[in-house]
Amino acid sequence: MKREDYLPRLIDEQVQLGLQTFGAICIEGAKWCGKTWTSQYHAQSSVFLADPSANFQNRQLARLAPQTVLEGNVPRLIDEWQEVPSIWDAVRYEVDKRGAKGQFILTGSATPTQKGIMHSGAGRISTIRMRPMSLFESGDSSGEVSLMSIFDNDFKAKATREASLESLIKLVIRGGWPGSLGLAYQSYRMIPGDYLKTVLEHDFYRLEGINRDSKKMHLLLKSLARHESTTASVSTLRKDIYAHEGDVITNDTISTYLTIFERLFLTDDLPAFFSHLRSTTRIKQASKRHFVDPSLAAALLEADYEDLLNDLQTFGFLFEALCERDLRIYAENLGGKLYHYQDYKNREIDAVVRLEDGRWGAFEIKLGAHAIDQAAESLLTIKKALEEEKAKGPSILAVICGMTQYAYRREDGVYVVPITALRP
């Protein structure tokens, strides 16, 4: 990789800090999200355990003589370390022996079983989660509005470039895969489907060495796509598969497969925001279903541009997923976390950003500007109810919108921000 060709990522700063603080870092995340490129940018030497050259010689060396793959200028990149899980302990031991920071960068596109790993690596190896590109990283958001500026009341209203429905649909279909940037629609729309095919045919077996029922896994993935951005339960997924496909999959099997999807970073569910509130209202604890990138859901639904243009309800769920993908990346870049809120009084908040200092913001996501008033009213109602229940209310209320050309603060205090103008 030529360093001048590298497109900066938001986790670059976190990678640099990790190398200054720990003996090694591990960058984990979905295949093709850019882990290797980012790691190579920060590394001084590298070894690739998934390289098939000479009958996977690097992998064999890592198993038989791990010290050989650890030698090289530091930081030393060991790509796809999970191919030889014992490398984890070898790195941890070498970090202890050297007593220096920034020695190794590990990358992993799957979480291996803990069998054979003796030590967690706590204090020696820091784990960093990487996701596909946000719109700001891919250049599809102007970055004119900072998420942090909204929290800090340093926000200035401005006119922004307006996104068209066509452009938003195509951003969902393309996804945040770095390899899709610069490609024509007919090319990039093929990548998520090919990605899923590769995972189904190869990665499931390589993760555990167990032959799983790929057909049933595919049916479950399709069901998850139909329930993208919802809190569908395991039982709901089971009933949905039977209704649409006529196949019977037990709850236990679905739970097992969901764990595998999570370990392969295919799914990226959004946890419920409940532990930080002191409210008398019962809060639902179900996570919101998400793929790591909305393009995977679109591919599983076999939805092209025309399909989504003619089914805006389905596209609305995929657009919500795109916005929450970006909000999660931005929140984590600021040291915070992303959640969703849902209680038993049928009150919901699409996304909740909680910062390190305890402040939190409530975000509703709407495709069109016509829905802004309703979203703002919902946010104000929930804030008032939480405060009446003596719970700590949100510091900010905001509507993330798809098709609007203005970022501004309404008279009622609710912010309106186009997703194509947002950055951390």
Image (cartoon, rainbow, N blue to C red):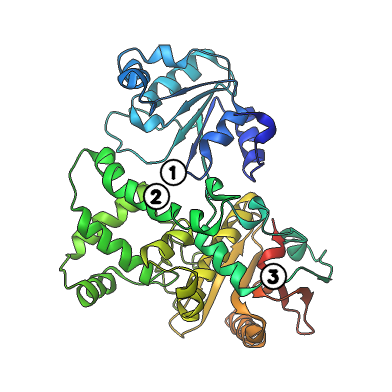
Q: Which tag is nearer the camera, tag 3 or tag 2?
A: 2
Q: Position of residue 42 (x, y in %)?
A: 62, 29
Indicate the position of residue 61 as horizontal and vertical percent values. Answer: 34, 15
Residue contact between numbered discs 3 and 1, judged by CB atoms under 8 Å: no
Quarter of the figure with the C terminus: bottom right
Residue at which label 2 appears: 195
Vertically, is 61 above or below 276?
above
Q: Residue at x 55, y 16 (%)?
A: 99
Q: Secondary structure at mark 3?
A: strand
Q: CA–CA distance between discs 3 and 1? A: 29 Å
Q: Which is nearer the eye, 401 or 52?
A: 52
The residue pinned by badge 3 equals: 418
311 up-or-down from 286: above or below: below
Q: Nearer the viewer, mark 1 or mark 2?
A: 2
Name the side, left or right, on which 252 lies relative to 411.
left
Instruction: Measure the alpha-carbon separation of dots 3 and 2.
Output: 29 Å
Residue 276 appears anywhere in the view = no
User: What kind of element bears circle 1?
Assistant: loop
Q: Earlier in the sequence, mark 3 or mark 2?
A: 2
Q: Residue sitting at 25 percent across and 63 percent down?
A: 219
Residue type pointed to by label 2: Tyr
- What's the mark number on residue 301? none
Decide: marks 3, 2 in contact (CB < 8 A)? no
Q: Pointer 1: what residue?
A: 31
Q: Nearer the viewer, residue 188 or 123?
A: 188
Q: Disc 2 on helix, strand or loop? A: helix
Left or right of 302? Residue 187 is: right
Q: Is residue 247 visible?
A: yes
Disc 1 marks a residue whose amino acid type is Lys
Circle nearer the N terminus (3, 1): 1
What percent of the width, then of the height, locates residue 126?
52, 35
